[in-house]
Amino acid sequence: MLSAFADIKLPEPRISKFVLFLIKLLGRTYLFLFYGITQIVPHNEKTLFETFDRVMSGKSRCIIAFRHPNGGESQLLAWFFLFKLRKYAVKHGIRTIRRPHAIFVYGYEVMRWGGWVPRFVLPNMGATGVYHSKMDSKGMSRIYKAIVSGPYPVAIAPEGQVSYTADTVPRLEPGVIRIGFHAASELEKINPDCPVEILPLSIHFRFGPWGNGNMELLLRLTERLCGFSRKESKKLKFSERLEKCRDRIIEVNEERYKIKNDASIPLNECSYIDRIEKTAYAALETAERMLGLKSEGDYFVRLYKVRQICWDRIYIPDLYDIEKIPQIERSMMDLKAQEAWYIARHQEYADFSWYFKSPVPSDDAALHTKIEYIQNLHDFANRTMGGAFGNRVSIFPRKVIIKCAPVINLTERLAGYKQDRKNTIADTLSDLEKAYLENINEMIRDEQD
């Protein structure tokens, strides 16, 4: 049975040369074993190299705003920045970048579910954690200091968490823009000639010849989970197999959350999103009801709150000597931790299902589009069965493409920010989204050519 634990205590972030050496020694093997990656390729790389050149020479400060659709982006980028970026930059005639690195910002829950590896590696790479749903002045101060003082760029995922799709931008949180403007305001006081920039960066997976076979294996596994035989599937087209699994998983969740629909109206490409959203909201409301919370306000604020409470019942904040607590109190903590784990199953489903809105790919869709959908379809079943992100199955890519858009200069927008913060933040966030969408459209055009 699950027990409550004392909260995880981490050292102050620092950059350890020994840990960087270990990452260099083991990083490529780690990426291959866990992501199967054989090639990392930058596109629009001149923008990336020139941005790093300005930052590392003290001419600017930068937030690398990276897309986070798959979960492994921070590891990939950290390794690439440390051990490949300079080599590529020299080929483009930029020889002034010395020991490139980036300070990554992560959600503190990573340390709770991620195990000892991130607990050891991340603080020793200078990475800093933040909470999504409670005040964290210490964590925010570290981030501002890292941006204003340099000498490295700070890498933040504006989506706030894994978003599960690379070819659309489901949602962006304004936090990265607020952080950037606050840092630009502070830096203006001490170094007005040093602008704060945001570098929009996207990551795209592409698959080799084995992608088709692995995709078929994962689809068959999903069909078995849904109770469909291989004999049944042979009679259907590829897209029909996907629809059949998706519809069955939706129906199971509607039964679970007592959602009634008109049986005479079949699922179609318009109604399935509405039906999934109903189950997502029902799952979140169920978790809130079990925690005694009111179901009101922004969906993701509510989601993060439930997640935080559940983790805080499993890892008790500010608790050092859990073994010295009287048995009756310790047993109560353990019971609450066990309850929190079950409540979090509803939260995990509510988290993923909100994002699962992509239409079923056609039979002639691009391979990466099909694979992304099937990975998400299997995860849809996984969350329905009580799984979490750690149970997600991913197909190894052959190539990872790092694509950059032109930087967004926040210092140039400071005057507007001081006059009208709300609209300036909204406009800048919109420009960031447009940059990501242009990256996506460029990828589509390049592959069509």
Image (tube, rainbow, N blue to C red):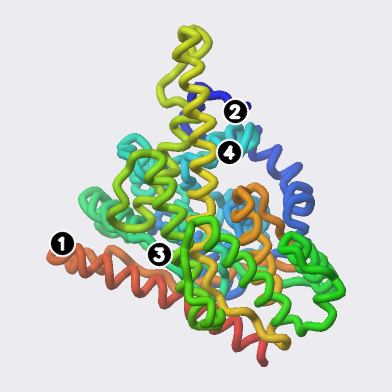
Please, what is the three-letter code of the amino acid marked with disc 1?
Lys
First along the sequence among labels 3 and 4: 4
Q: Nearer the viewer, residue 155 or 246?
A: 246
Please, what is the three-letter code of the amino acid marked with disc 2?
Leu
Q: Mark 3 points at which residue?
A: 172
Which image quadrant for residue 180? bottom left
In front of the other: label 3 or label 4? 4
- Residue occupying image coordinates x 28% and y 58%: 181
In front of the other: label 1 or label 4? 4
In this rendering, would 421 be left or right of 1? left
First along the sequence among labels 2 and 4: 2
Q: Which residue is outermost to the bottom?
A: 449
Q: Nearer the viewer, residue 232 or 260?
A: 260
Please, what is the three-letter code of the amino acid marked with disc 4?
Trp
Q: How many labels does the image show?
A: 4
Q: Where residue 55 sits in the image (x, y, percent)?
A: 44, 56
Q: Is mark 2 on a helix, strand or loop?
A: loop
Q: Where residue 309 sits in the image (x, y, percent)?
A: 41, 37
Q: Mark 1 points at which residue?
A: 418
Q: In this view, does 416 lie above or below 29?
A: below
**Mark 2 to mark 1 CA distance (whole Å):** 50 Å
For label 1, the crowd category at 10 Å Cα-Cα, with few meaning under 14, some 14 to 19 and many 20 or more, is few
In front of the other: label 2 or label 3? 2
Q: Is residue 314 above or below residue 173?
A: above
Q: Name the residue under label 4.
A: 113
- Residue occupying image coordinates x 54% and y 31%: 338
Q: Which of 334 and 177 is in front in this view?
A: 334
